[in-house]
Image (tube, rainbow, N blue to C red):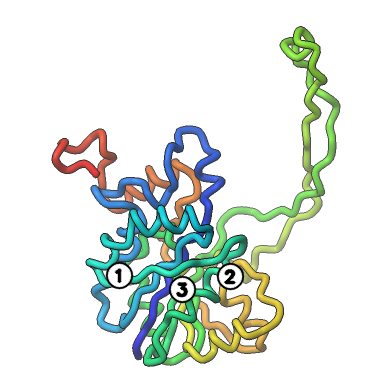
């Protein structure tokens, strides 16, 4: 089995950047003296089954040029190449990156750039299953109760003394109500890396409808089965700054301010 790994790194990180305390793109954050993105790439660059690593970055000219300036040399040293991803949707990014995976790769693994905590054991587990099954995803059981909410409704305006003084209209508050409780039996949260036979993933991306939040969805639309293997609770996705704090704890890294000056990013 020869694997081409695609690292999806084209996202704008809006939720992260809109969070209090965020000052840079999450992939640029310091994680033990290296950019978070580099840590993610390093999960795969020494694995015996990995032939190629493609990091799919932003598509827009300015963002792409900045991304390439920051990462091309750093990632080339550890065996990864860059390509342009999509403009609006994740599937655009993966479709573009597939074109850069060499024909000799029998399998393609897709991993979120914002998951730097995937353990070697998890990666080995998914890769081992991919030797027997054509599509494999790591999954975690859901412990919380799941509820579906109503569409947002406009609540009565909340009194705002400052707005009254300035003559501004009161800001209406949006509210939602619980519509139903979802049976969580058999429901799981899906992680990455997800691994597929290369020919199967290429066939999936040849479909007309590519709207999806992960690649396994496209495999399911072909009527193919996707094997679920045990995920890892430590394999978190960095979405807000609090996740970065947790990732540092998982990996045993101190934030820059707590490290000696010569060891800072």
Q: Which circle marks residue 120 in the picture?
A: 1
Residue at the spot x=76%, y=7% of the render? 165
Q: Which circle marks residue 92 in the picture?
A: 2
Badge 3 or badge 1: first in the primary sequence: 3
Residue 90 at x, y percent in the picture: 57, 65
- For this rendering, which residue is in front, 22 or 216? 22
Badge 1 or badge 2: first in the primary sequence: 2
- For this rendering, which residue is in front, 129 or 215? 215
Residue 71 at x, y percent in the picture: 33, 58
**Residue ranking furthest to the top:** 165
Q: Secondary structure at mark 3?
A: strand
Nearest to the eye among marks 3 and 2: give it: 2
Residue at the spot x=61%, y=60% of the render? 88
- Badge 2 local density, few (<14 within 10 Å), some, or many (20+)? some
Q: Is residue 183 above or below residue 150?
A: below
Residue at the spot x=83%, y=24% of the render? 157
- Badge 3 local density, few (<14 within 10 Å), some, or many (20+)? many
Nearest to the eye among marks 3 and 1: give it: 3
Q: Is residue 158 left or right of residue 56?
A: right
- Badge 1 local density, few (<14 within 10 Å), some, or many (20+)? few
Cα gap from disc 1 to disc 2, whole angstroms: 28 Å
Residue at the spot x=47%, y=90% of the render? 133
Q: Secondary structure at mark 1?
A: helix
Q: Which circle marks residue 110 in the picture?
A: 3
Cα gap from disc 3 to disc 2, whole angstroms: 13 Å
Cα gap from disc 3 to disc 1, whole angstroms: 16 Å
Nearest to the eye among marks 1 and 2: give it: 2
Badge 3 or badge 2: first in the primary sequence: 2
Q: Secondary structure at mark 2?
A: helix
Q: Quadrant of the N terminus?
A: bottom left
Residue 207 at x, y percent in the picture: 67, 84
Residue 102 at x, y percent in the picture: 39, 86
């Amino acid at each position: 089995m020869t694997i081409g790994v695609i690292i999806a790194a084209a996202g704008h990180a809006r939720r992260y950047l809109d969070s209090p305390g965020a000052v840079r793109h999450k992939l640029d954050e310091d994680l033990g003296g290296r950019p978070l993105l580099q840590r993610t790439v390093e999960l795969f660059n020494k694995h015996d089954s990995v032939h190629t690593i493609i990091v799919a970055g932003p598509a827009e000219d300015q963002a792409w040029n900045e991304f390439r300036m920051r990462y091309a040399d750093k990632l080339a040293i550890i065996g990864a190449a860059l390509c342009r991803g999509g403009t609006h949707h994740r599937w655009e990014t993966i479709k573009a990156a597939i074109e850069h995976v060499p024909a000799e790769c029998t399998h393609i693994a897709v991993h979120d750039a914002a998951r730097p905590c995937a353990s070697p054991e998890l990666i080995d587990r998914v890769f081992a299953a991919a030797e027997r099954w054509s599509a494999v995803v790591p999954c975690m059981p859901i412990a919380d109760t799941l509820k579906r909410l109503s569409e947002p409704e406009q609540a009565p305006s909340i009194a705002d003394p400052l707005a009254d003084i300035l003559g501004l209209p009161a800001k209406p508050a949006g509210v939602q109500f619980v519509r139903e409780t979802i049976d969580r039996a058999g429901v799981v949260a899906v992680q990455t890396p997800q691994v597929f036979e290369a020919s199967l993933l290429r066939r999936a991306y040849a479909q007309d409808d590519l709207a999806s939040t992960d690649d396994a969805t496209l495999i399911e639309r072909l009527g193919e089965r996707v094997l679920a293997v045990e995920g890892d609770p430590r394999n978190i996705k960095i979405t807000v700054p609090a996740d970065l704090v947790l990732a540092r704890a998982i990996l045993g890294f101190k934030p820059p301010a707590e490290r000696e000056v010569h060891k800072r990013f």
